[in-house]
Amino acid sequence: MTAPPRNASGVPPKGGAAIGPGEPVPRLPLGGLARRGLLLGPSGWAVVAAALAIITLVVPGLNLLLPAGHPLHLSDFYVGLTGKILCYAICALAMDLIWGYTGILSLGHGLFFALGGYGMGMYLMRQIGRDGNYKSDLPDFMVFLNWKSLPWTWGLSDSFIAQVLVVLLVPGLLALVFGWFAFRSRIKGVYFSIITQAMTFAAMLLFFRNETGFGGNNGFTDFKRILGHPLATENMRVLLFVITGCTLLGFYLMARAIVNSRYGRVLQAIRDAETRVMFTGYNPLAYKLSIWVLSAMMCAVAGALYVPQVGIINPGEMSPAASIEIAIWAAVGGRATLIGPIVGAFFVNGAKSWFTMAFPEFWLYFLGALFIAVTLWLPQGIVGLFQRAKEGRA
């Protein structure tokens, strides 16, 4: 008796029967396993090259080279806004890896984003030096609260390299510990989502307390410089934009390599039929835990890039609503597509920026209506809509 046929994820199809003697073996269509080894096709690399040119050449040229009165001039406001949305797009991409490709819906990724932001914010606060309002070596909020010395958590905050490691290791370690207990206990579905949101809410309440040494409800702000260079300049703003855009492209290519690999096919098999994956000899715990930690660290990097561009970080970034928005970006753009969550982040946040200026009181209603509409009529998101239109023309 022959083994049952397996789908692209390496798992027997649901309800599939064995192929009997003499029966034809089904052929994979083009774009299936035969093309799994390709990271991107020619058109895909062309899009990546065009995006890289826009990030590194077009936007800096429109902002720095053209005068403010020129019709093609890109203002500092829009450079900063786009840079902020690029950070959000990294979070949406990280969400797609665990939700779209592994089937793990997290409602707590805002915590990892905020921890990365706090890690970078600690370094930026130390860079202020004696230029603060109280002319002290301590951050202003510590002087106001009558702190006499830096707490132990700030011991390495004057080193950029050390804080970069903190940005990566602290959220990664937290995700590792939390994920180990959650996945080992086989917590999944809505229960996992609720627990992640509870973890984020508890962390937000902790960071609101002044005695934790993280600025309380005001957080960190009034940054002056980074690596000795002033932050409030056009050149620095554009440089941060370019770094953020290149980081997003790098993460996208990394995610594409992951989902096209054997490791990625196992992740998708876990999403579709975790029990069958266990029966085939794979341990879902290692796969789920590794992609969970990677996704958390991606969000932390996004938070670290977000803080110097926006100029503030506070516990509000850990609010449950912030984490829910990350899931909305992925759903609106289209899960399990990689490019979809990036599109969703730009679409939702672009609409948010316009609505909050034109109709500020209706923004939350619009966001709720958008999520309901996508759930009912666009289950594959914006990218799925274009894919169906393309298939219809073909």
Image (tube, helix red, strand yellow):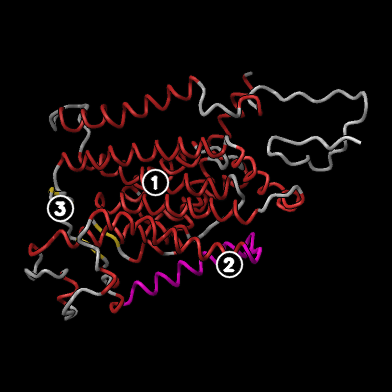
Give neighbour class at mark 1: few <14, some 14-19, many 20+ (Cα, 10 Å).
Answer: some
- Give how far apart the Cα atoms at labels 1 and 2 are: 34 Å
**Which of the numbered marks, if any, corresponds to residue 42?**
none
Q: Position of residue 330 (x, y in %)?
A: 51, 46
Q: Position of residue 216 (x, y in %)?
A: 29, 73
**Image side of residue 221 versus residue 9, left or right:** left
Check disc 3 and report the residue beneath it.
Answer: 225
Relative side of 234 to 151, left or right: left
How far is the residue under mark 1 from the one under mark 3? Answer: 27 Å
At x 77% / y 51%, what residue is drawn?
A: 279
Which SS class for mark 3? strand
At which x and y percent is residue 210?
A: 28, 77
Q: Give the residue furthest to the front.
A: 281
Cα separation, mark 3 vs mark 2, equals 40 Å
Q: Residues within 10 Å of mark 3 (few under 14, many from 20)?
A: many
Which amino acid type is marked by label 2?
A: Phe
Residue that carries the numbered disc 1 in the rendered image: 349
Q: What residue is pinned by disc 2? A: 181
Q: Main secondary structure of the magenta part?
A: helix
Quick check: 222 above or below 339? Answer: below
Residue at 67% across / 49% down in the picture?
Answer: 270
Q: Is residue 210 above or below residue 40?
A: below
Question: Is residue 186 on the magenta stretch?
Answer: yes
Q: How many C-alpha atoms fall within 10 Å of the one at disc 2: few (<14), some, or many (≥20)?
A: few
Decide which of 130, 170 is in the foreground and name it.
Answer: 170
Q: Amino acid at mark 1?
A: Asn
* Circle 2: element type: helix
SS type, badge 1:
helix
